[in-house]
Image: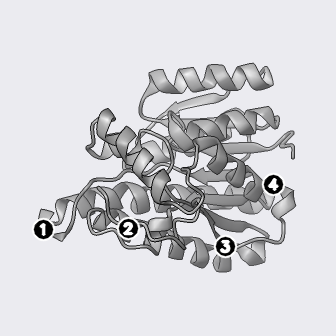
Amino acid sequence: MDFINKVVLITGASSGIGAACAVLFARASAKLAIVGRNIDNLKKVAENCETESGHAPLLISADITIEDDVEKIVKETIDCHGKIDVLVNNVGISIIAGIRDGVQPLDKIMETNIRGAYMLTHRVIPYLEATKGNIVNVSSVLSTKAMSTMTPYCMSKAAMDMFTKCLAMELADKGVRVNSVNPGPVRTNFFTRAGLNSEHNDALMTNFAAMLPLKMVCESEDVAEMIIYLASDKARCVTGSCMLIDCGTKIGKVETII
């Protein structure tokens, strides 16, 4: 797979799955615009991308919950690259919370995971229609598998799956494909950002691996490989799909262990 002369816009690219995506797309010769709030981390990712491709990506420091920042993302990408072929809606947050924790965790998660992605996608669509490009959303196995300690997050990812399917129907007549990847547990800083300490996070990954049918958890690069496939011409007949990459989480008997 190569993305020569293709422009790929990736949100949440400063760490984890987003950072792994940036490096893989760089290796495949894509022109990149990478977005994140942590500019220092973005610079490190950019260095890795330049090592792979010989070209530095466009770095955009932005918060997709802020409408002016969303406009900035699109403007800077178009000013630099002139077009957009692929949008990877990867940015997302989680909070370990249930209904007893009130509405604030839900509001915060939905603002980033859904509203932010919706605003950015709305502004990018005209450019994707012009290039007959595509969108890959990062969802989760928890869109369909309940975890009571992460109720707002599960709700946001269920919404992301429906967003994916509705967009795929709405944009198909313009030749724009829309899909999602739905990871299970991934070895990133996801749970530490949700409130766990590093020691608890490491133990959690070990426990997940022991319970999952494949006896392992995904790495960021595994998910990135699925994303780059869906974004490529090899997946030209795939749209409206929510692709599990979960080491068997969905079919296994994974209990709530957070």
Q: Which residue is mark 1?
A: 100
Q: Which residue is mark 3?
A: 241
Q: Residue at x 73, y 67 (%)?
A: 177
Tell me, for residue 232, which label it has, or none.
Answer: 4
How far apart in space, not on screen, are marks 1 and 4 (Cα)?
A: 43 Å
Place of residue 246 in the rendered image (x, y in percent of width and height, measured from the top left): 57, 60
Q: Is residue 218 visible?
A: yes
Tell me, for residue 154, which label it has, or none.
Answer: 2
- Amino acid carrying label 4: it is Ser
- Amino acid carrying label 3: it is Ser
Query: With 134 as the anchor, is 147 left or right in this view?
Result: left
- Amino acid carrying label 1: it is Arg
Q: Bin the neighbour count of mark 3 within 10 Å (Cα to Cα): few under 14, some 14-19, many 20 and up.
A: some
Q: Earlier in the sequence, mark 2 or mark 3?
A: 2
- Amino acid carrying label 2: it is Cys
Query: Where is the C terminus found, in terms of image quarters?
Result: bottom left
Q: Nearer the viewer, mark 2 or mark 4?
A: 2
